[in-house]
Amino acid sequence: MSFDAKTQAILSFLQAQATAAPELAGEYAQMEDLYKRKLWHQLTCVLEAFMVLPTAPSHLVPLFETFVKDFKHKLNKMALARIQMAVAHQMKDVDEVTTFCKAAAEDAAKEEAQASSFILSELARIQLTADRVEACKTQLDKAAEYMEAAGATNAVQASFYRAWVAYYKVKGPAHEFYTHALLLLAYEPLSQMPREEAVTISFDLGIAALVGENLYNFGELLEHPVISVLQETEFAWLAHLLRAFNAGDIAQYEVLVAAHHTQLEAQPALLQNTNFLKEKITLMCLTETLFQRIGPAADRSVSFDDIAVASKLPRNQVELLLMRALSLQLIRGKIDEIDATCTVEWVLPRVLAKEQIQMMHDRLKTWCGTVDGTLGFLEGEAPELAAA
């Protein structure tokens, strides 16, 4: 079979690459065969498998520029985007990468919006590694526009949120990192991540939960495999700390701080937020104390003395604590300064632990018994009401 000069040059390139890298000779031979036969789908599969081989990275840029460019218009846009991003991650110059990725995203947008979103998300992460934080944000905002126009797959969603996680880890705030990290894990579970990445994101999530503003319920996180990952590492102390915060257990918090002060002091985010952490667990102690007063047959009034004992605060600081909780909208209720009580009407909704669900079950059961007793009394005292 005879080939034109362009095709012959490509085949010669593949043969030369196979000779130069004997460990990849089989893959190059497959590419040559499938290219000759114009089996584009099969060739795409071989290329995607080639991209993840440990010895392949140094080959990716010349392979794309000399070989893949010739038939890229025949490939599925998402598959092509994955190949292009594997190539982009091997490019050294960030300006070259930016030009390459923007052109790829524009080309993909004509047929496949989610491919463009994937490309821009990966470009955002690459720019972030070059300290181009604002450029990263620009790419992510553009990627979000494409996401709205496409029913993105889990892999594309994961790429998008992984880039946001990287951005908020650098830029902050912690609560945005926390939210986007949980979204990432919804599309790519920890079990599907490399072990190192799984441990890193679990640790970062735990730290973000502690120092993040407006994060006063860790129930969702405590039910997540993140905690299991932490418990299997040297960061088990962080899992214990998160449980103490969620329960508002100040005594346990103080024990953990004393036992793990070396690890805590090694974390700048925790060290810089010492006062905030103390305030936070005190507020979480308050909400847990008041939560126990919510529900049928529960006494919604709690004295300042009871709050002082639970929160380990001086009696004269209880009112300030309640005002702080009200201002943060963690609770709703009324403070009676004369009787020194707080009547609670609402506590911030939360993901409940099993013990809390059992408490609510028992309280509802008691309430149902009270209602049945009252109904029986009324029927006995006023039978005409029952007849009606």
Image: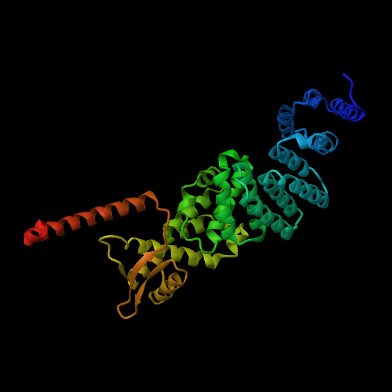
Q: Nearer the viewer, residue 105 or 244?
A: 105
Q: Write down the quadrant of residue 170 in the picture.
A: bottom right
Residue located farthest toward the top when viewing the structure as drawn:
1
Residue plotted at (36% across, 68% down):
307
Could you say where residue 374 lies in the image, as x and y percent from the top left? Answer: 15, 59
Is 265 placed above or below 151 here? Answer: below
Q: Is residue 43 left or right of residue 66?
A: left
Q: Is residue 334 above or below residue 114?
A: below
**Viewport quadrant of the C terminus:** bottom left
Asked if residue 363 can be seen in this view, the reply is yes
Say how many tags the image has: 0
Q: Position of residue 119 (x, y in %)?
A: 71, 46
Point out the image quarter for the N terminus: top right
Residue 317 x/y as whole percent: 42, 75
The residue under the point 68% across, 48% down is 117
Give the residue at x 86% y 35%. Answer: 66
Q: How did the renderer colour the structure?
A: rainbow
The residue drawn where x is 48% and y is 64% is: 280
Residue 261 in view (yes/no): no
Q: Which image quarter: residue 130?
A: bottom right
Residue pushed farthest front? 110
**Vertical comparison of 377 with 62: above or below:** below
The x and y percentages for residue 216 are 47, 61
Q: Which one is nearer the viewer's eye here, 250 or 129? A: 129
Outermost residue toward the bottom in this view: 338
Residue extending farthest to the right is 5
